[in-house]
Image: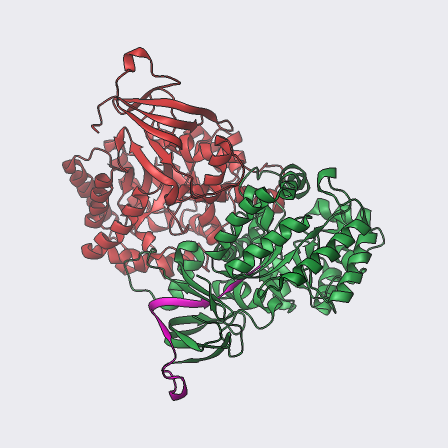
Chain colours: A red, B green
């Protein structure tokens, strides 16, 4: 099916226009025109009669999901050696594994597994960390483009506090490699995959490197992704490294990479204080909430309800390999579950998240980082996932909303029966 | 293969003799004689040469897992309408659904789904709540026997604080029905399935009913299962209902159904105080730790490390439908994850659980309620699960322990390639 052709999917549509609500349209037509949602109809109007229709029977159709934070090279060691906190975990598991990606054969194999699994998931968009290695990162981008995933992918910058085998030799070298990588990406003319600037986190990036990356950001207009306020030890370390910073986020903002002119995603924000929250709000920084990772690394639980109340944009991240799975249904249930434990154990002023809210976060919430993505409202990119929930047997009749709730709690790639990204069928 | 025949499985054996340690024997023979583990050998000794050997190649072989707490009738509404606490959830979801099991056609369909899914899981033993209905509970027991699962199943007792449609008319009627059910079970001569007395929880059972059940327990020697200290609202209610009780568990112990002569499982124990813990320890009460349920119903996180330090017997429960899945690998990961959040958010004096510890809880820990179950030590019941983890691709070599860790975090019924219960192949 050509991308430009007008066509329709017919089935049970579920999407959300605003957080906390669901739009449910049973046995409706979802029309795609020029890769975008043209409209939803109970019956096709006359001018659309004759367009191809994919009849999906009783299946569910939801918007494609966005993974706002995931480390592709870490997919290989997901679920291994999980019993440590962030900084020890980085030294013990992450850095040795990421160093292997200087070997392109290894990268091809490892990224092949990652890409194949993302392809079969409900994810249509993702913001992805690679490694410091240009060639491996380009290879990952090639694979994602081939798989049809609309991804922002970052070659990672690290010039300090990292082992010799995974550290760029200077700020200048890191910046130079970044420019070369951006140039190589441009020459590949990807249709779906874009570069994103990716200073790993403040402890890994010298002030000089941050300054240079800011220059590249201003020149290129690229977006930025990094980590923020994930773990108490990390936060204390940033304060030592940047004693001039008012709070962790200020150490990014100081270099112009914290929202505002520079579209920015910050992962985690478990411990953001009032000032940091205020700055994120003013600057329109996106938060990637990664509940499973924050649990596995004993980081804590982010106050997502507060971010929502403050109208800070929030989406969900799988954060493999702090998280164990690319499955964003799992991220949704983890977000509900973590919010309930936070309510019970720490702070009953913040109500737990519910299923409508986490569905929003995973679809329109995170999708907003890519523009008009994550909804079936007219003009949105036609990212659609077809769900066949027949595996999840039940003895009683269930309505469409209940079926979605079951997929959120129990679903994985087995429920994903088809997928469109910006109007193109990729699965 | 006949149950009585001596045979061996050959593969990579993993089990645990004591909590916190793993026994790993690669490419060894696990010999079954008369339904029990006869021994483990690197090569078969002369006297065993010629016995049938199931060659399992590089697969993993672990002891069967025990689900110490699960509600079979709730399987039908798992993952639905989860955004409430225990008492509201019981009224809204549980009681209406459980009342449907007076209809045997419905029960057959619903229990059929439950039994089939348990059969394909890594669970070989389970302690299961039915409903108040004798016929449906017998039907469930028939199905489990047919599936080869070694289960203790309880017809539930409820004579107060329950809706008319799901309440026995008096303590006497409830006791009478219980005797009739026990008699009917005896007449069926099950090989694997046993009855267990199941007062739902103190709020559902009058003092008079508890007294009558105690009489039945003394006559029959049956074990008992119930709920304890799950939710703050529940605990306050028990104190109102039994103002004479020193603590919630005392309201069971008062009627002789809290360990000691009466083998007892109590599910949850999220809020057990010092006195209750001391009594459980003295009486040898088993605790069924149900981390996912305690999260989904915003109950809290049980101090499992303390129970282990006190040497109270602990196993894991899926607690469907407070939990969403029969998969005990999920219960293991949830137990680790919950313990990490408890450490971070409430109490850094209790170290989080690690993978070796939760593997013990799900195998030998819970298995102990059934006797010598959950280990491959000689004389243990031959409950064995064969795991094929080929689905969980990885680019680097992994050792057997790492492969088990991945199954704990990522595994489900797809990894279960075979299963033996007390020497009989059931899958």
The image quadrant of residue B414 is bottom left
The image quadrant of residue B402 is bottom left
Residue that sits furthest to the front in the current view: B187
The foreground one among B321 and A298 is B321
Q: What x and y, as percent, mark residue A255?
A: 34, 38
- Which contiguous range is marked in magenta? B43-67
Residue A81 can be seen, yes or no: no
Q: Residue at x 66, y 48 (%)?
A: B131
The foreground one among B366 and A68 is B366
Residue B121 can be seen, yes or no: yes
Would residue B341 be found to the left or right of residue A28 on screen?
right
Would residue A426 be found to the left or right of residue B5 on screen?
left
Would residue B406 be found to the left or right of residue B144 on screen?
left
Q: What x and y, as percent, mark residue A160?
A: 32, 53
Q: Residue at x 76, y 54 (%)?
A: B248
> Does the stretch in magenta take in A71?
no
Tell me the quadrant of the picture where the C terminus of chain B can be found.
bottom left
The foreground one among B130 and A211 is B130
Residue that sits furthest to the top in the current view: A46
Tell me the quadrant of the picture where the N terminus of chain B can be found.
bottom left
Q: Residue at x 41, y 30 (%)?
A: A364
The foreground one among B294 and B51 is B51
């Amino acid at each position: 099916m050509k991308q430009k052709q007008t066509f329709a999917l017919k089935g049970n549509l579920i999407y959300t226009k605003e957080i906390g609500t669901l739009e449910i349209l049973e046995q409706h037509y979802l029309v795609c025109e020029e890769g975008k949602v043209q409209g939803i109809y109970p019956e096709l109007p006359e001018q659309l009669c004759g367009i191809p229709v994919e009849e999906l029977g009783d299946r569910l159709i939801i918007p494609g999901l966005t993974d706002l934070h995931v480390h592709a090279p870490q997919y290989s060691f997901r679920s291994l050696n999980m019993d440590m906190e962030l900084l020890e975990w980085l030294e013990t598991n992450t850095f040795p594994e990421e160093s292997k990606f200087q070997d392109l054969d290894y990268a091809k194999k490892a990224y092949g597994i990652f890409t194949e699994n993302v392809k079969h998931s409900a994810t249509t968009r993702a913001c992805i960390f690679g490694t410091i290695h240009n060639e491996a990162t380009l290879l990952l981008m090639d694979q994602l483009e081939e798989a049809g995933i609309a991804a922002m992918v970052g070659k990672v910058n690290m010039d300090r506090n990292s082992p010799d085998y995974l550290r760029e030799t200077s700020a200048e070298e890191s910046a130079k490699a970044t420019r070369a990588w951006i140039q190589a990406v441009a020459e590949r003319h990807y249709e779906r995959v874009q570069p994103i600037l990716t200073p790993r986190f403040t402890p890994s990036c010298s002030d000089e490197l941050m300054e240079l990356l800011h220059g590249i950001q201003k020149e290129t207009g690229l977006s930025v992704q990094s980590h923020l306020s994930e773990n108490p030890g990390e936060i204390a370390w940033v304060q030592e490294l940047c004693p001039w910073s008012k709070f962790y986020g200020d150490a990014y903002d100081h270099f112009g990479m914290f929202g505002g002119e520079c579209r920015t995603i910050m992962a985690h924000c478990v411990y953001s204080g009032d000032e940091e929250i205020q700055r994120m709000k003013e600057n329109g920084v996106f938060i990637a909430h990664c509940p499973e990772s924050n649990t596995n690394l004993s980081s804590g639980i982010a106050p997502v309800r507060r971010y929502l109340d403050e109208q800070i944009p929030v989406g969900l991240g799988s954060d493999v390999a702090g998280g164990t799975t690319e499955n964003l249904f799992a991220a949704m249930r983890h977000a509900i579950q973590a919010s309930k434990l936070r309510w019970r154990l720490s702070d009953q002023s913040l109500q737990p998240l519910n299923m409508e809210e986490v569905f929003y976060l995973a679809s329109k919430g995170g999708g907003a980082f890519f523009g008009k993505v994550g909804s079936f409202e007219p003009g949105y990119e036609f990212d659609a996932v077809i769900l066949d929930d027949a595996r999840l047997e039940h003895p009683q009749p269930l309505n469409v909303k209940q079926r979605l709730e079951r997929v959120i709690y129990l679903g994985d790639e087995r429920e994903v029966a088809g997928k469109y990204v910006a109007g193109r069928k990729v699965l």
